[in-house]
Amino acid sequence: MRTRPAGDEEGAGSSTPPAPPVSLLRSGRALLEHIGPYRWRIVLGGLLGLAGAAAAVGQPLAARALIQDLGRHDAVAGALTLLSGLVLLGAVLKALSQYVLAHAAESVVLNARSRLTTRLIRLKVRELERTEPGDLLSRVTSDTTLLRQVTTQSVVSAVTGVLTLIGVVVMMATLDPVLLWTTLAVVVLVGAVISGVLPRISRATAHAQAAVGAMGALLERTLGAIRTVKASGAEERETARVRRAAEDAWHRGVQAAKWQAVMGTAAGLSVQLSFLSVLGVGGARVASGAIEVSTLVAFLLFLFYLMEPVSQLIQAATQFHIGAAAVARLREVELLETDDAPPRPTRTRRRSPAGRPATVVFDKVVFRYRPELPDVHRGVDFEAPGGMTALVGPSGTGKSTVFALLERFYEPTSGRVLVDGRDILTLPLPELRASIGYIEQDAPALSGTLRDNLLLAAPEATEEDVHDVLVRTRLDAFVHALPAGLDTPVGHRGTRLSGGERQRVAIARALLRKPRLLLLDEATSQLDATNELALRDVVVEVARETTVLVIAHRLSTVAMADRIVVMDSGRVRATGTHEELLARDALYRKLAATQLLLPTPEGFTKAEASQG
């Protein structure tokens, strides 16, 4: 059973954790890392967009020529054809640009989700226990989605917007510098307002994304223990808790939407003010004879084309600040510590079941879950050279922690854990875990079919191997009775299986791997007497060729062990066989008389039992 470090509170309110400050520089670099593999596709989309913008910039000049031809009563077919061609060409190029960029954006999101998922599954156990699973899921789903907008509307729009803006400004300057300065004065005024709004958008988005993660964490907490919630009559309280988190996420989202609305309004306002200003000043200049009407019309058309790149830049800045908050949250996950990298898949021959059993040594092991917590192990010393070793002791003495250290879910604070005489910290993690079969106390099952669960640790197992292990664990009759046999779904977390069936599936899964070291954490606690007896015989058989460490609270399991390690207060109190420990260790006699359900041995008084 996984030990939860003390001091962690689950569901302690629905308030959103404070969002960390967003560094735009670091976020920009991280964003470029995500975009890097698709940069040429993005460049192509940008070039197509620029070509479309160039076709659009040429349209006001074609319109000016058309008006001039109409004024002179010249033929207008050429000017009209040119204008129509530019409109059609600009539309086609813009559509192609949008498709290419959208394709690239989806690829960026896919790559980010793949990287993040791979990292999440490989996170060290201690890192996973510090973070709510719902919040991690939010980062994979919600935060990565924002990368799509950033890719198309921030990076590319910024580049194409700047280049288009330069081109339009140059063309406007050739028409009338006075009207150009009138336009730029309005744009600069509105830009000053926008520059003050952008940081607020970044902060508001960071808080909104954190709020969504907190809501997901609370919902995952409730659904993960839904039977307990229902049995406790706590549906309304849990619903209210999630609802408060949802309202908090709504409030944060509204705050972000408010500042984005200000940005959008500022962009629209700049268009309207610029149009009115140019119309007023330009009308006066036409009346004075400084410019022709055709020039004013062309300038007004350029003005509308100017507003598109300006809007692009505003949207780019907005989306970058939104994306910066999302990228910062993704970066947090990328900084978490992971296990060793898995080996490259190769076709290797599976270990023979007659392979050498592993030897296990704990050498003065001290361990605590966090620096501020007390030691769980206080110098644990024992050996398991082979055969079957049982770990017994009162609850909280660190028995399950022995298994967690062997699997390297955690690492010792001091001391050494040796397998085959080698410190496991020097062993490649995949190699270490490949030699271990681990059966947890709650025997979890994964959503999927029964076959998926059996082959989880040994995907290369043959049908003969599967049939053999089903017979040994007495699952063959159960599987035969299922409507789809091994392809029958087991439900979310194995809810369609009983506790005993899940335990037998877990044992079968571990045996199918043919490990050199088998760890059983109260692996038969939910079995009936008949199946428990049969599986004990299987464990005894396995112990002839595999080192078995078992945590058990039943005398029937402990008594058949080759050696028994008695743990108390984070230390090894005594080691020996069942008969030896009954004769010389008071705590073991107490455990045998109570937890191990053995009648009090002759000569063992109640006073001794109370003293332990």
Image: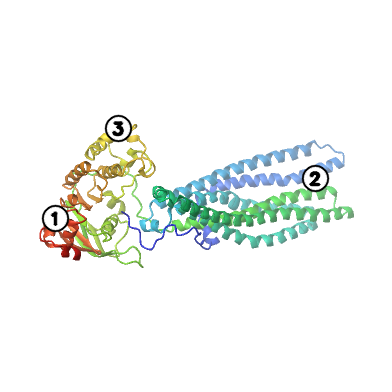
In the picture of the structure, the residue carrying the numbered disc 1 is 578
Residue 478 lies, in percent from the top left, at 28, 35
Q: Of residues 226 and 547, which is closer to you in this image?
A: 226
Amino acid at dot 3: Ala
> Between marks 1 and 2, how big is the CA–CA gap?
103 Å
Decide: marks 1, 2 in contact (CB < 8 A)?
Answer: no
Asked if residue 31 can be seen in this view, the reply is no
The answer to whether residue 146 is left or right of residue 496 is right
Q: Which mark is residue 194?
A: none
> Which residue is at the far right?
288
Q: Which mark is residue 64?
A: 2
Given this view, does label 1 or label 2 mark the residue nearer the observer? 1
Which mark is first along the chain, 3 or 1?
3
> Between marks 3 and 2, how big is the CA–CA gap?
83 Å
Residue 499 lies, in percent from the top left, at 30, 44
Asked if residue 432 can be seen in this view, the reply is yes
Residue 52 lies, in percent from the top left, at 66, 44
Q: Of residues 404 and 353, which is closer to you in this image?
A: 404
Residue at 36 percent across and 52 percent down: it is 341
Q: Secondary structure at mark 3?
A: helix
Label 2 Cα neighbours within 10 Å, binned few <14 / some 14-19 / many ≥20: many
In the picture of the structure, the residue carrying the numbered disc 3 is 481
Q: How many marks?
A: 3
